[in-house]
Amino acid sequence: MLVQARTPSSVLPGSAVASVAYTGLPPQGQEVMEQIRQGGPFRYEKDGSVFGNRERLLPGQKRGYYREYTVPTPGLRHRGARRIVCGGQKPRLPDACYYTEDHYSSFRLIVQ
């Protein structure tokens, strides 16, 4: 079973949210999505921590709504720039997940 993202209800009419198909994620991103659904284990200590959305590129929500997860980059010894950020009250069943490959400069909604 895969995590399915729904379009967030808080997206304002007329706003454009780029998207990426689950199958369009890098293999490591697909693995992280499966780990999210299973509740871990995660590779990095910071995975699952609250994402503050300070860039305000994601739909506005109360603090604690979004959580971030590292998408490993082959060949790097550090966390790199790729992340998945999921929103919802139940981390294993997120309302929506977003992928960024440029460390929060842009996001794409992950869809099935």
Image: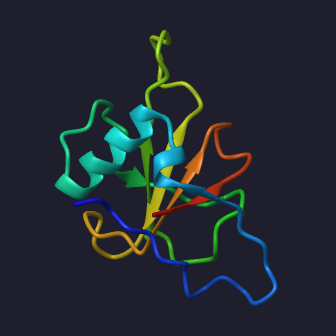
Relative to 95, is 56 above or below? above
* Residue 47 appears in view: no
Image location of residue 91, percent across then percent down: 29, 64
Judging depth in this view, the residue of 89 and 33 nearest the camera is 33
| Quarter where residue 14 is shown | bottom right
Picture coordinates of residue 104 (x, y %)?
66, 46
Residue 81 image-quadrant placement = top right
**The N terminus appears in which quarter of the rendering?**
bottom left
Quadrant in the picture for the C terminus: bottom left
Q: Position of residue 69 (x, y in %)?
A: 41, 44
Tell me which residue sits at (46%, 16%) in the image.
Answer: 74
Q: Can see residue 98?
A: yes
Q: What scheme was used to colour the molecule?
A: rainbow
At horizontal 28% and vertical 70% (from top left) the residue drawn is 93
> Seen from this angle, which residue lies furthest right?
14
Q: As drawn, is 98 to the left or to the right of 90?
A: right
